[in-house]
Amino acid sequence: MTVRLYLPRDAAARSMGADRVARAIDETVHARKLDLQLVRTGSRGLLWLEPLLEVETPRGRVGYGPVTIESVASLLTDVVLKGGAHPLCIGLIEQHPYLASQQRLTFARVGVIDPLSLQQYQTHGGYQGLQQALRLSPADIVQAVTDSGLRGRGGAAFPTGVKWKTVLDQIATPKYITCNADEGDSGTFADRMLMEGDPLCLIEGMTIAAIAVGATQGYIYVRIEYPDAIRTLREAISIARAAGFLGPNIQGSGKTFELEVRCGAGAYICGEETSMLESLEGKRGEVRVRPPLPAVEGLFGKPTVVNNVISLASVPVILARGAAHYRDYGLGRSRGTLPFQLAGNIRHGGLVERAFGLTLRELLYDYGGGSASGRPIRAVQVGGPLGAYFPESLFDTVVDYEAFAGVGGMLGHGGIVAFDDTVDLAQMARYALEFCAIESCGKCTPCRIGSTRGTEVIDRIMRNENREQNLVLLQDLCETMLQGSLCGLGGMTPIPVQSALQHFPEDFMRTRS
Amino acid sequence: MSDAQAATALDANQLQIVQAELACGKARPGPLLEVLLAIQQRLGFVPPAAVPVIADGLNLSRAEVHGVLTFYHYFREQPAGRHVVQLCRAEACQAMGANNLAQHAKRQLGADFHATSPDGLVTLEAVYCLGNCALAPAMLVDGELHGRVTAQRFDAVIKELTGRS
């Protein structure tokens, strides 16, 4: 009987040699005339084990990793092909503690199925959400999303249902659904993993959004740094279209929705929604002044839904299993699950989808296993380059939107970057301002000029030139940027700087030449 | 310089490609960024002499085309080396030694960021996040992602690249 093997085609797995392993497997299969089928999947998100090979057995899939080309010969044996012992064996993958304790709603299929198999997608619950949506009125779909408590997973955490309601209520046509896949925050890769591992889920979510608000055209704005995601999405769109899940008369409903991938060109600011809309219109990615909101006057001046990948990809499961099912996860005003991403100096980096409500410490130590270097974790930055640096004393903070705001941080897109005790927080604060200077769109002065002046002030502090006065000046500059910037880039760059000053003042008192 | 003169600065092949991409992009809404991406994809860069041709083709001003071309980091107005190495210098990679790796890369290639090695083989670029933050430091070599890049691994990848060329 044919033995089925699974190996990710995810970019992270490929970055560790998954394609070379796949070729070695093919060659061995030919040489030994083995009866094997190799299925390329997304990644399970246990990234330190990549490339992670799985063998299908009657008990479930058994994992082996990290696989090297040298280990392929010893893996393709009778013992291993029955899920047996091998030095790289990690046992039944779904019982692995990293995975077994997760609550995978949005990422349920990622790493399990062939991302470009419509049949596998549907076998694993795909398009049930759309079927349900087609039975409901637009207002009822919007109500279900509102009731689920889903908030924008891109970082701003605005209630998704409220946004959709605003677009539904507009009279102007055409309306657009745009997906913000310009995942530029360091420490985040959930969007990429979903687009590569379960692209049809995003497409289904966007289709439901279109039916809910009456939109006929959608765009997925993907950053050019994600070539694999761009390729996979384009293939998935043509598969969905060929099967009548996109295009005119979706599944005989009479509804039309066309979808297209558009690429960015290396500008962090285009992750800001109005800047992304400018870029989609083919212009410089300069931030727009709000109001009008994109929901009223968005792309090409028409009512537009702008949602992050994870927000849209969470919609199918909400429709399929009901708003209450999703809302029952989480706590307070943070409902459902968030795919956390453990990154940087961390032993077991990867993706952890859990309901809101666990602590940073659980994520860093129970899942992450501490630092990769073996040294103590001194600081973590949560929420990307505009997020706060937290010291160990705040590791017991409960992970939800409000608790993070309460300690001067933000959860953002759920990226957590760990640093060991060799980190220099004055340098990281300087980098935050340098990054802002490089990526500023230039429209408003606090961001364009303040970022450059800020790096100069930190340089003086580090050289001990009038340190006390310059520390006051830096705080003052941060306040100006915070209060006076047009968008989140200039307005939030002070967060990493001020948190570094607050929690790690000693790093600013050390004199460097 | 008139439009006709600028256009003559493009060789016949370049002009043909620019015009083909214009013809193909014209009908789509907001086509400028798409057209520029397609031209860079095919030529490896966007020649400054293409700017007036694109402006004319899309009924935009030269300033609008120039503005977009220079806003986005991805576009280059000069040809790159034969290979392009994009090294991530964002926070997660810094936490795993990206700054030291960048110094090593610059030394080995004899080129700073946004510059090409003296033999013209490798262009070094800084990027800010490749989405491989759990396997940092990361780099993209001719569009192929690498993770856990040490100085030794960097040297091996470069040796394989330049040995092949």
Image (cartoon, rainbow, N blue to C red):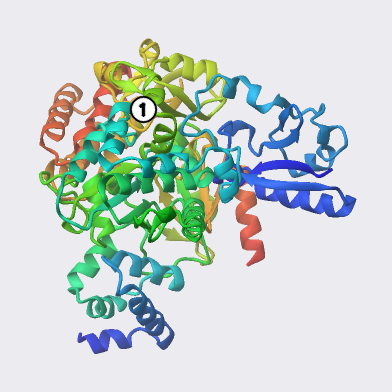
Element class at badge 1: helix
Query: Observer-nearest residue: A257 or B124?
Result: A257
User: Of A340 and B125, which appears nearest the observer?
Assistant: A340
Q: Residue at x 19, y 68 (%)?
A: B64
Horizontal relation, residue A138 to residue A398: left or right: left
Q: How many marks?
A: 1
Quarter of the picture holding the C terminus of chain A: top left
- Quadrant position of residue B60: bottom left
Mark 1 sits on what residue? A323
Q: Is residue A338 left or right of A126 when viewed as pictured?
A: left
Instruction: Using the rendered image of the protein, determine whether residue A440 is visible from the camera's viewpoint.
Output: no
Give the quadrant of residue A355.
Answer: top left
User: Could you tell me residue A295's position as x and y percent?
Assistant: 19, 45
Quadrant where the image shows the N terminus of chain A: top right
A360, A35: nearer the viewer: A35
Q: Chain for mark 1?
A: A
Task: Locate residue A492: give its quadrant.
Answer: top left
Which residue is rendered at x = 34% and y = 22% of the image? Answer: A335
Whether A89 is drawn above or below A190: the answer is above
Q: Position of residue A242 (x, y in %)?
A: 50, 61
Q: Position of residue A111 (x, y in %)?
A: 59, 38
**Residue B145 in the image: x percent, y percent?**
55, 49
Residue at horizontal 33 percent and vertical 37 percent from the top: A154
Eyeballing the image, is B75 above or below B139?
below
Residue B70 visible in the shown view: yes
Give the amino acid type for the residue marked by disc 1 in the picture.
Ala
